[in-house]
């Protein structure tokens, strides 16, 4: 679905992405993980065309992404950011329908698609008339997901979509999102800093450090055949308290 060919990006004197070759498989969930500032969100923004590479080329569905075609190609991509990015002066329904109305969809088509998405995401119908400030964090993320899915995109790009939620809500939404991904069978690229979340969603997992992909594989491969000592340190640093307690008890 995506192919990055020798793509690099810098901001001032900071190298955000070193020359990178990368392929994102179609119909699967690929997870980008790594410490803060490693370049994972920058890679996502390069894929959706929000920023342009300094060198190299980004291809989406075999078409090179350029400033001239980015707006058109972006209509085939859904994008969700951490805080949802909802417009506060629009209701939930108005946020979801925004692009469809901008593209002059017929009213009946919009209503039909909205009904499908409400059912898919288990969003309460009576919440559609509420403004973002009147919704819970989990509900706001459902609205963001519905908005991203409104045009039935080929790919979903999610930048730490659950990072701001409390653990119980996050766990519930992880299960729901995975079910949605499996139902829709879409290509998904998900950014997270949480290894357990990466393992839950991703195959493959791409671990980044300082603007470079250090290792690509399953969690088992990262644990059993780490590319270098950083991989081992990163995985071990994210052991849950229960894992640590179990090992100490043993």
Image: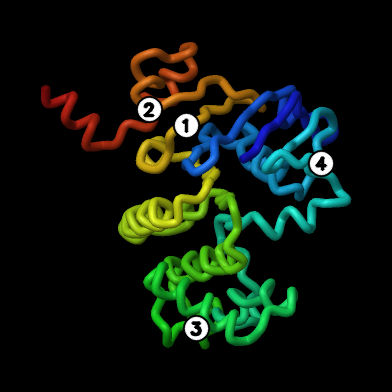
Distance (Cα) linking label 2 and label 3: 38 Å
Sequence-first tag of 1 and 2: 1
Image quadrant for the C terminus?
A: top left
Residue annotated with mark 2:
219
Residue 106 screen position, x and y as percent: 66, 83
**Residue 18's x, y, as percent?**
72, 23
x and y, in percent, of residue 110 in the image? 59, 80
- To which residue does mark 1 refer? 205
Mark 2 lies on a secondary structure that is helix
Characterize the local packing of mark 3: few (<14), some (14-19) or many (20 or more) Cα atoms within 10 angstroms. some
For the residue carrying disc 2, how many other residues have a C-alpha within 10 Å: few (<14), some (14-19), or many (20+)?
Answer: many
Q: CA distance from mark 4 to mark 1?
A: 24 Å
* Mark 1 crowdedness (10 Å alpha carbons): few <14, some 14-19, many ≥20: many
Quote the CA–CA distance across marks 1 and 3. 35 Å
Asked if marks 1 and 2 touch (Cβ < 8 Å), the reply is yes
| Residue drawn at point x = 16 percent, y = 30 percent | 246
The residues bearing labels 1 and 2 have C-alpha atoms spaced at a distance of 7 Å
Q: Report the Cα–Cα distance between label 4 and label 3.
A: 35 Å
Residue 52, label in figure = 4
Residue of label 3: 128
Q: Secondary structure at mark 4?
A: loop
The residue closer to the viewer here, 5 or 249, is: 5
User: Which circle's residue, 4 or 1, is located before the other in the chain?
Assistant: 4
* Residue 102 vertical position relative to residue 182 in the rendered view, above or below: below
């Amino acid at each position: 679905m995506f192919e990055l060919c020798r793509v690099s990006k810098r901001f001032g004197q900071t190298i955000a992405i070193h020359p990178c070759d990368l392929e994102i498989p179609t119909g699967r969930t690929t997870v980008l993980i790594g410490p803060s500032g490693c370049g994972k969100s920058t890679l996502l923004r390069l894929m959706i065309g929000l920023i342009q590479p300094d060198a190299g080329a980004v291809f989406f569905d075999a078409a090179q992404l350029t400033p001239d075609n980015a707006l058109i190609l972006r209509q085939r991509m859904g994008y969700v950011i951490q805080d949802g990015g909802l417009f506060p002066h629009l209701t939930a329904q108005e946020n979801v329908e925004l692009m469809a109305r901008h593209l002059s969809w017929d009213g009946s088509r919009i209503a039909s698609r909205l009904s499908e998405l409400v059912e898919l995401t288990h969003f309460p119908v009576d919440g559609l008339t509420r403004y973002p400030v009147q919704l819970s964090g989990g509900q706001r993320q459902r609205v963001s997901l519905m908005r991203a899915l409104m045009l039935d995109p080929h790919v979903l790009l999610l930048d730490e979509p659950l990072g701001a939620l409390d653990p119980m809500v996050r766990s519930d939404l992880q299960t729901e999102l995975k079910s949605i991904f499996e139902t829709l069978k879409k290509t998904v690229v998900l950014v997270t800093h949480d290894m357990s979340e990466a393992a839950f969603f991703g195959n493959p997992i791409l671990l980044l450090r300082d603007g470079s992909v250090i290792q690509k594989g399953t969690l088992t491969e990262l644990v059993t055949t780490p590319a270098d000592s950083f991989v081992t340190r990163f995985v071990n640093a994210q052991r849950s308290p229960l894992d640590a307690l179990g090992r100490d008890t043993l």
